[in-house]
Amino acid sequence: RASLVYRHVTDLTIPQSLMSDELREGFSSNAHVDGRVHGQTGKASLEISVPEGMSVTLGGRTMGDSSVRKIGGNVLALRCPIEAIEGVKGDVGLLYASAKRVRNCGGDLVSFYHDRWDGGRWLDGKRLRTEPSPMSIKNVIGHIELDVGNVDVELREPSGSVAVKNRTGKTELTGRRLPGDKQCRIENRAGDIVLKVSEEVLRERHIAASALSGEMDYRILSELLDSVRTANNPQMMLISNQPVRDSRDPDINDLEADIFAVAEYGDIRFELLK
């Protein structure tokens, strides 16, 4: 079942010098000629209901905000912006598609998205980069795998394993009880990493972090634990909540820690959840 609410479309030609972020919100350009921009204003709202258990595929770039809610099957989005994905029982795949909010999903979440649609603009001989777009993920039951760029990622209470590669943007992980048999691995190239975890997680889970050029703030670990292991060489700085052991003890591989954060040019910070 489909319901369409259509609003009047107006043809406009605007001097390029007058284009602004506010104007772009309601204006879709399709031609640039002699310093003038041609396009249309107007929107259409489309609501589609599908039978229970059916999977859904979305595709195409739109002016408005798309949302997906209460789907019994899988959801696949291709080259489109999505405001919210909520209550999906199956897997969620985002290929060259952005999603501001992903909530309460029962399957895996896989996303490949580098924000190039709005990630840079050419204006008056300059290239302007916009701020990273937000992506908030909460209560996803399955595995989470993200390969993103120019995105600020917020991960809250994951239930499965986590693998994040963020080229530019901040990555924040919040967890009071992370699953004991799952691994969280976060790699940031040019953004900061913030790990907000409970005292239980800090004490009972193997946590390690490595930075190449940024700083690591691990004062919370030092205050809670009897000892924190540190290491340094030309390739990395490393900290671990595993104590220094006698040489006769079995080796500990920090690269296979339960929670492992790697920052190339950003900082890493630990925070304690009360």
Image (cartoon, rainbow, N blue to C red):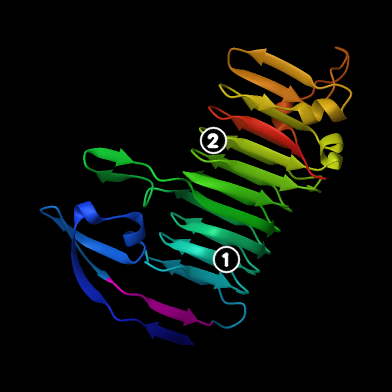
CA distance for labels 1 and 2: 25 Å
Give the percent coordinates (x, y) of residue 198.
81, 43
Give the percent coordinates (x, y) of residue 166.
53, 40
The dot on residue 85 is 1
Q: Main secondary structure of the magenta part?
A: strand
Q: Quadrant of residue 181?
A: top right
Side of 20 relative to 68 (left or right): left
Give the percent coordinates (x, y) of residue 55.
55, 72
Range of residues picked out in magenta: 41-49
- Camera-side residue of 201 and 52: 201
The dot on residue 191 is 2
Give the percent coordinates (x, y) of residue 56.
51, 72
- Camera-side residue of 251 and 268: 268
Furthest-front residue in view?
Answer: 18
Category of crowding for the residue at label 1, using alpha-carbon neighbours closer than 10 angstroms: few (below 14), some (14–19), many (at least 20): many
The kind of residue on which mark 2 rests is Gly
The kind of residue on which mark 1 rests is Ile
Which residue occupies 57% across, 22% down?
Answer: 212
